[in-house]
Image (spheres, rainbow, N blue to C red):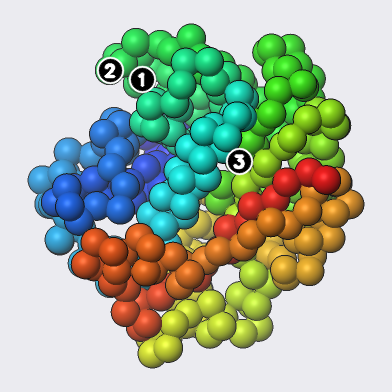
Amino acid sequence: MIGLFFKKDGTAQAIAMHRLVETLAEENQRVISDSYANNFVLGGRLFKFIGYKLNTLILRNIVPGLHEHLIARTKYLDDIVKQNVANGDRQYVILAAGYDSRANRLELPSDLNIFELDQIDVQKRKISILDKIIPRSKKITYIDIDFRKDSIVNKLSNAGFESKKNTIFTLEGVSQYITKDSLFATLKEISQLTKTTKTTIFLSYTDSVINQSPQYLFGKGYPNPRKIIDRIKKIVDALGEPWISFYSKKEIEKLLIQNGFKLKEIKKLEDLNDKYFVSINKPIEDSNIFNLENFVLAQNF
């Protein structure tokens, strides 16, 4: 029974597990802190018992640099959300939310309307867990959606989304799991919803060099890039969510432009090493740099 459910939320649990592990570090050695993550991870108590150092050693032996990549992505998006809200955004839409905890974790203002969209089974589990540990926030609206057939426009409009409010949309760690047509359709729907106001989009993508020249995703001296890529593909396959789509920067820019958005910034792990890791005295060595995804920030014209 647990195994069957894990197929539905395996990736969401895996990401929450990395946030949990980072939270186990000493306070002055954490890039992020997430007091909710433990509740979403099957076996969370075991991770806490093992502790930060042993957990990170195990993770590094499986896929060096993956933990740092995911934590950098989390922190980078944390900063973007907080900055956009400070600059006047009053709606925050989390597409394929999984066990994202920002709505509660970032202490966002009460007049910010937050919409979390994901498949019904994941939403039900998330809500049932949160209801046991924290009062339900009126600013958060949970929306069940089947991204394969449901309209994002209709779902959000029916849930109270206001097209005149400045909004940030996030699609974190998703593009490699969906078809390119699906990503295009998602951007098109966002564009339809936000024609008259300032809109920011965050999305991440895995570069198409992953198949032919995977070494370009890694730092100097990283051990066996091809072997690591094969290993991580097997892991996501086992979680029931295989990678199917990869992009070049030109493809992403074209997709954005076609839907009325312009690229503002692209970052990856190696770009964020100084800001997030060196600054707290735990720099990532080149031999552990894994630029699995590019982090994209875009705005409408």
**At which x and y percent is residue 250?**
78, 69
Q: Earlier in the sequence, mark 1 or mark 3?
A: 1
Marks 2 and 3, how far apart at CA: 25 Å
Q: Which residue is mark 2?
A: 133
Element assignment for label 3: strand
**At which x and y percent is residue 31?**
30, 53
Q: Is 61 on the left-hand or right-hand side of 54?
A: right
Residue at horizontal 63 percent and vertical 35 percent from the top: 168
Q: Amino acid at mark 1?
A: Leu
Q: Earlier in the sequence, mark 2 or mark 3?
A: 2
* Identity of the residue furthest to the right in this view: 258
Residue 235 in view, yes or no: yes
Q: Is 219 on the left-hand or right-hand side of 194?
A: left
Marks 1 and 3, how far apart at CA: 21 Å
Q: Residues within 10 Å of mark 2 (few under 14, many from 20)?
A: few
Element assignment for label 1: helix
Q: Nearer the viewer, residue 130 or 164?
A: 164
Query: Contact, CB < 8 Å: mark 2 with mark 1?
Result: yes
In the rendered structure, find residue 202 and report the number of the disc placed on it. none
Q: Is residue 211 above or below residue 107?
A: below
Residue at horizontal 24 percent and vertical 52 percent from the top: 30
* Identity of the residue furthest to the front in this view: 87
Q: Which residue is mark 3?
A: 170
Q: Residues within 10 Å of mark 3 (few under 14, many from 20)?
A: many
Q: Which residue is mark 1?
A: 130
* Identity of the residue furthest to the bottom in this view: 221
Q: Is 7 on the left-hand or right-hand side of 211?
A: left
Q: Amino acid at mark 2?
A: Ile
Q: Amino acid at mark 3?
A: Thr
